[in-house]
Amino acid sequence: MPDVLITRRTFPAVLDLFERAGLTVDHNAADTPLSRAELAARLQGARALMPLLTDRVDAALLDAAPSLEIVANVAVGYDNVDVGAATARGIVVSNTPGVLTEATADLTMALLLAAARRLPEADAYTRAGRYQGWELFQPHLGLDVSGQTLGIAGMGRIGSAVARRAALGFNMPILYTSRSPVPAVEAELGARRVDLDTLLRESDFVSLHLPLTPETRHLIGAAQLALMKPTAILINTARGPIVDEAALVAALESGAIAGAALDVYEEEPAVHPGLPALHQHVVLAPHIGSATTRTRERMSLTAAANIVAVLGGGKAPNAVN
Ligand code: DGY
């Protein structure tokens, strides 16, 4: 029985790492998602599981894998893993913090800019041969970014990296919410910690950087969207269910807010049917926050390093339980 089940195609450097550690792998190089039954069957005898965020690792699956010692998620978020159930069975769960911070913050700014300046619309217009010459009132007049207020819900690693880009690169005043103050962003960037309602009321752009937990599910619903400025844009590169997508579509349709830039969705890979119909200041990406080749390799190597540590009798450097 192989030691490690890798649920989807991985990088050669990961396979090298396992080989050097003397661990055998069952690598789903075909890269088609494994069904629950296949996962359970291939976990028989496995000591480590290296899943993606699309693999649901719940109590039933863990019960089907009695030899498991670690679940090393290839993601910083781990809402796909029942951590309580893993802990109860003595199984370590690890994630990949740090290595994807900059890539995700870059994408957040790209989405913010694209939505404010209506880039997807302008691109489609130009490609369609519709550009007839410069006019004062061009069809894609957008919203200013520089100097506008950015509200960041969740000032962890990624929130802080976004704040740095926005404050230092775009001169944006920063408001933020966080369970406790983050003195570094206050001292370095002049960021101001406020409650969520104040952040929603006062920000021109609102960007979400929170984990998905029972407390953050639908944190942004109709009542919160109603607090936002009609000129404001919501950016979500965290987890889809933090936003009530139906309420967001309603807010966009009614003009309660000006736009949204989304990288994540409530029922991925499904996208609310109301969203693709909206174009002005609406940008939709397919969960690509960390999607640079180098970052994805570093995430995979981080997960693998956690497995090597635990199966070698040590501690997982990125254990979350
Ligand atoms: C994560 O790591 O949690 C992202 O959503 C995927 O990179």
Image (tube, rainbow, N blue to C red):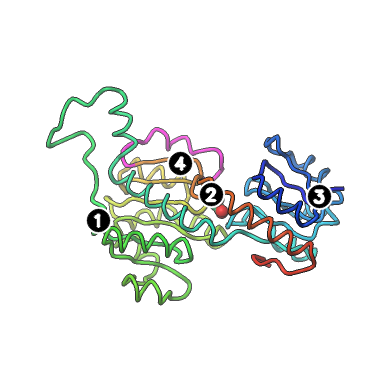
Q: Amino acid at mark 1?
A: Ser
> What element does badge 4 sit on?
loop
Query: Is label 4 or label 3 in front?
Result: 3
Q: Residue at x 27, y 22 (%)?
A: 129
96 sits left or right of 149 in the view: right
Say which quarter of the image contains residue 114.
top left
Of label 2 and label 4, which has the lower sequence position?
Answer: 4
Q: What's drawn in magenta, residue-wise?
A: 265-281
Of label 1 and label 4, which has the lower sequence position?
Answer: 1
Label 1 to label 4, Cα distance in Å? 23 Å
Of label 4 and label 3, which has the lower sequence position?
Answer: 3
Say which quarter of the image contains residue 267.
top right
Label 4 to label 3, Cα distance in Å? 36 Å
Extreme top residue here?
A: 129
> What element does badge 2 sit on?
helix
Q: Which mark is residue 285?
A: 4
Q: Tag 4: Cα neighbours inside 10 Å, few (<14), some, or many (≥20)?
A: some
Residue designated by label 1? 146
Nearest the viewer among 100 and 67 is 100
Residue designated by label 2? 294
Q: Which mark is residue 95?
A: none
User: In the rendered image, which quarter contains the C terminus?
Assistant: bottom right
Q: Amino acid at mark 2?
A: Arg
Q: Is the C-beta of the residue carrying label 3 under 8 Å from the nearest atom of ligand 1?
A: no
Query: Is label 2 or label 4 in front?
Result: 2
Label 2 to label 1, Cα distance in Å? 30 Å
Q: Which mark is residue 24?
A: 3
